Image (cartoon, rainbow, N blue to C red):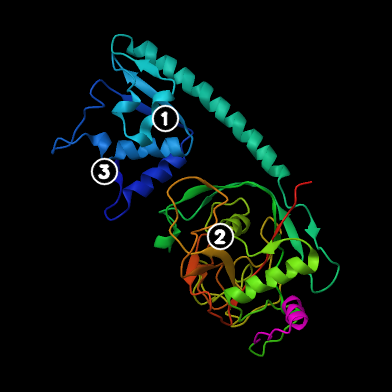
């Protein structure tokens, strides 16, 4: 991609990274003067973190793309000592050569090799998709058969891209940069947000003050008016009551579950409607325009689930996550837990009184952990012991 085609005011680093993410194969064309190419000040371009060639190669290496060096004429593969540390892995990639004297033959050879590589990539993708079809939530789990014990779904391990792309409408700065996340182990997540029935039982068992319900009723409605400590205390009590370790989901677990394998703004696609989620219908995300505004919560399970069987991940109530709030790291990570400390926790998912844009899978809301509200609830995550 030519950086000259990137619109004014856009972050070209993120856009280049997004474009590389879409590639199956990346070619790094290396000429004789590639290492020595400099800007007007005489600084080598590869020494500049903002150089677009360096950005593209770094992105391909970080994303573990099939990166093929193409050596032009008598150019040689660079030594690691001649490159920034972030580009050192480039020196281990098998190269191909392109010369003026045998240009036609070399081009044909490169094209044939690329076709073979694409076939291999397509075969691997088919295998991954087939494996993905097998990775579905494995039924409903309830540790104790009682109304106060939440229904959980066992979600598969897997990978996803966390955060929102530059092109996503209403994107916010704390949703970037996009980065690959690996969820290394299956885990449990509540089929619904915790209900008043479930939370009130906890309060009665621990002599804890019950939360307010705004006069809307209790029962199967999601519990509201709970802060981060209330939600964490419930998870700790549930662990003791059931013998399974429960906790608030990490942000990564929450977004992974919400997306359920999708890359669109919502798990339902590029748009969301009031038939799919409970939000301020006067402020839709896109056409077909305005809809109903319910002005209160609806009972758990009232609205359609995502493809993994999780209800009301978008809207109804904001949901607490375990993490302290912090900026995302611009690299692939495994089972991220957020910063070790901080002053703000994170809410996810949007709520009944939020505009549709705040229901996006990538949206995150940093907030003080002692905040309560008529639109704040939570759902539990649980540890699945290895058999």
Q: Percent position (x, y) of residue 274?
A: 60, 71
Q: Secondary structure at mark 1?
A: helix
Q: Quarter of the image containing the N terminus?
A: top left
Horizontally, is 331 left or right of 86 in the view? right
Mark closer to the chain start, 3 or 1 = 3
What residue appears at the point 53 percent right and 54 percent down from the top-left corner? 264
State the mark number for residue 89.
1
Q: Looking at this rendering, what residue extends furthest in the top direction?
A: 101
Which of these two is toward me, 324 or 374? 324
Q: Secondary structure at mark 2?
A: helix
What residue appears at the point 58 percent right and 51 percent down from the top-left corner? 335
Label 1 packing within 10 angstroms: few (<14), some (14-19), many (20+): some
CA distance separating discs 2 and 3: 36 Å
Label 3 packing within 10 angstroms: few (<14), some (14-19), many (20+): few
Q: Which residues are magenta?
A: 198-213
Q: Percent position (x, y) of residue 346?
A: 52, 67
Horizontally, is 365 left or right of 84 in the view? right
Check disc 2 and report the residue beneath it: 251
**Quarter where residue 208 is shown:** bottom right
Which of these two is toward me, 326 or 107? 326
Horizontally, is 21 left or right of 157 in the view? left
Q: Looking at this rendering, what residue extends furthest in the left direction?
A: 41
What residue appears at the point 32 percent right and 23 percent down from the top-left corner? 78
| Res 62 seen here | yes
Which of these two is toward me, 347 or 73? 347
Check disc 3 and report the residue beneath it: 4
Mark closer to the chain start, 1 or 2 = 1
Query: In front: mark 3 or mark 1?
Result: 1
CA distance separating discs 1 and 2: 31 Å
Q: Percent position (x, y) of residue 189?
A: 69, 60
């Amino acid at each position: 991609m030519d950086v000259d085609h990137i619109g004014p005011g856009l972050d070209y680093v993120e856009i280049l990274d997004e474009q590389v993410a879409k590639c199956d194969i990346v070619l790094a064309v290396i000429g004789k003067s590639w290492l020595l190419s400099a800007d007007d000040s005489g600084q080598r371009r590869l020494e500049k973190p903002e150089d677009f060639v360096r950005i593209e190669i770094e992105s391909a290496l970080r994303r573990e793309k099939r990166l093929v060096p193409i050596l032009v004429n008598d150019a040689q593969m660079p030594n690691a000592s001649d490159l920034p540390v972030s580009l050192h892995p480039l020196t281990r990639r098998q190269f191909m050569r392109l010369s003026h004297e045998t240009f036609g033959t070399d081009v044909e050879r490169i094209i044939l090799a690329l076709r073979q590589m694409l076939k291999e990539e397509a075969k691997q993708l088919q295998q991954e998709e087939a494996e993905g079809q097998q990775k579905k939530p494995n039924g409903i789990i309830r540790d104790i058969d009682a109304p106060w014990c939440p229904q959980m779904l066992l979600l598969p391990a897997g990978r996803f891209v966390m955060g929102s792309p530059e092109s996503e409408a209403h994107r916010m700065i704390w949703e970037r940069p996009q980065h690959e996340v690996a969820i290394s182990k299956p885990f449990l997540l509540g089929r619904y947000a915790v209900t008043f029935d479930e939370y009130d039982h906890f309060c009665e068992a621990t002599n804890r003050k019950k939360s307010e319900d705004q006069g809307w009723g209790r029962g199967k409605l999601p519990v509201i008016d709970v802060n981060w400590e209330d939600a964490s205390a419930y998870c700790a009590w549930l662990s003791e009551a059931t013998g399974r370790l429960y906790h608030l989901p990490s942000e990564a677990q929450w977004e992974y579950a919400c997306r359920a394998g999708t890359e669109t703004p919502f798990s339902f696609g590029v748009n969301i409607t009031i038939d799919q989620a409970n939000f301020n219908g006067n402020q839709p995300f896109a056409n077909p325009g305005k809809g109903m505004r319910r002005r209160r919560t609806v009972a758990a399970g009232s609205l359609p689930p995502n493809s993994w069987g999780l209800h009301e991940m978008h809207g109804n109530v904001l949901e607490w996550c375990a993490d302290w709030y912090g900026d995302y790291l611009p690299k692939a990570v495994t089972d991220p837990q957020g910063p070790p400390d901080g002053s703000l926790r994170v809410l996810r998912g949007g709520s009944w009184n939020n505009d549709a844009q705040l229901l996006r899978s990538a949206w995150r809301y940093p907030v003080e952990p002692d905040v309560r509200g008529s639109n704040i609830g939570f759902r539990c995550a649980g540890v699945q012991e290895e058999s």
